[in-house]
Image (cartoon, rainbow, N blue to C red):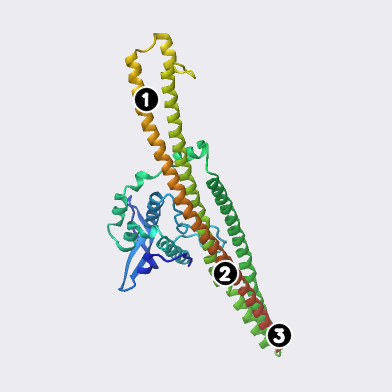
Amino acid sequence: MMVERETDLLRKIEINVAEAEKRTGKNTVNIQETYTVYLIETRYVISAPDSLWRRYSEFELLRTYLLVTYPYIIIPPLPEKRAEFMWHKLSADNLDPDFVERRRVGLENFLLRVASHPILSTDKIFFRFLTEEKGWREAVLETGFQDKADSRLKSLSAMFRVKNPDTRFTALKQYSDELNTVVSHLLRVRARVADRLYGVYKVHGNYGRVFSEWSAIEKEMGDGLQSAGHHMDTYAASIDDILEEEEHYADQLKEYLFYTDAVRSICRKHELIQYELEMAAQDLAHKKQQKEELVTGTVRIFSLKGMTSKLFGQESQEQRESRLAALGQSIQEGEEMVKEKNKECQEFMQAAWEDIERFKEQKDKDLREALISYAIMQISMCKKGIQVWSNAKECFNKM
């Protein structure tokens, strides 16, 4: 389990996803379905434990709420809903017990990530998710977070039209894309290696069968061959546990694969805020130009109003003064809007960058530990292989 720091919430309560259970029931469109629920246990340090069941879709709703409510925070990802980067012997069924167990671990890790975050851990909706089985969904919807969500089209438009993107966020977005590519490749290589390794180990079972058959026709050599065969059978069977353990290391890498999308989400939000600031500044500049043209009587660029004046005569002094007053009011409102948008942009950048620095520290630590643990596991596996052949050698020596 990778959790970076303790917060007030984690000092008060312990959180774990204790078990998973398969259930059958009707969904929102009244269709019978089979699904998995997860038992969340919370225990105050000074009292007895409490527990409640949650579906994966409720975890998704919680995360979406956090994404919208805290756009400047890199929200921890959920474990995969369906298995990705699998080697061929791994079940793709999302109700498979091994997959459900790994997802249980991932969901617990998600809760602990949120609970250990200095800001997210104080969120009241998150606390209700942990402690109130009924009424939580209504409470999260009552926050109105869905109305605040930025549309994908709006974000896409900002990405292509923003004129002065912040170089730090541009570099972060590029790094996130590259990290996503690297981790994806690493997981694909690992899946291919797992396939090959599974085959190599299982083929060793043929040694066991052949040695056993051979022992039946030998008197002096029989016992040694039989024992060597048993060692080969044990070696062949060990790969199932080895690759199951490997999946947990793969899941740690997948967490950071999914984290890259959370990082990109922050970059997209910054682009949108920056774009809104630029649009407000552009609108203000246009209004100031209109006022200057009205005051001086000169038109810098072709306009419909300028053409109308030439065709139908100049407007009266009263009309002109009325327009000037309206423009003055509009300019004042525009200046307030630019000031507000500039403040929003600055505050977002400061808050986001604090969380990005926290995330970088966490990422480096977690990935270093995961890779070291994976290397240790591989070394252990190789040592066990050496031990099997050493044992077989001893059997041959005794023949």
| Element on which disc 1 rests | helix
Do residues under tags 1 and 2 come within 8 Å of each other at their CB atoms? no
Kindly state the secondary structure of the residue where label 2 is placed.
helix
Marked residue nearer the N-terminal end (1 or 2) = 1
* Residue for point 53% across, 68% down: 244
Front-most of residues 152 and 265: 265
Where's residue 66, x and y in %?
39, 53
Residue 373 badge: 2
Q: Are marks 3 and 2 in contact (CB under 8 Å)?
A: no
Circle 3 packing at 10 Å, graded few (<14), some (14-19), many (20+), is: some
Q: In this rendering, does residue 129 appear at all?
A: yes
Residue 148: x and y, percent? 37, 44
Q: Secondary structure at mark 3?
A: helix
Q: Residues within 10 Å of mark 2 (few under 14, many from 20)?
A: few
Q: Relative to residue 272, is residue 324 drawn left or right?
A: left
**In screen coordinates, is 128 left or right of 190?**
left
User: Can you name the residue that lies furthest to the top here?
Assistant: 312
Residue 369 rendering spot, x and y as whole percentages: 55, 67
How many angstroms separate mark 1 from mark 3 (CA)? 99 Å
Residue under label 3: 396
Using the image as rendered, state which of residue 351 and residue 224 is in the foreground.
351
Amino acid type, residue under disc 1 in the picture: Leu
Question: Which badge, 3 or 2, is on the more N-terminal residue?
Answer: 2
Q: Which mark is residue 327?
A: 1
Residue at 38% over, 29% down: 331
Seen as rendered, the residue at the extreme left is 135
**Outermost residue toward the front in this view:** 296
Q: Judge depth for marks 3 and 2 and give the one in front.
A: 2
- Tell us which disc is closer to us: 1 or 3: 1
Q: CA distance from mark 3 to mark 2?
A: 35 Å
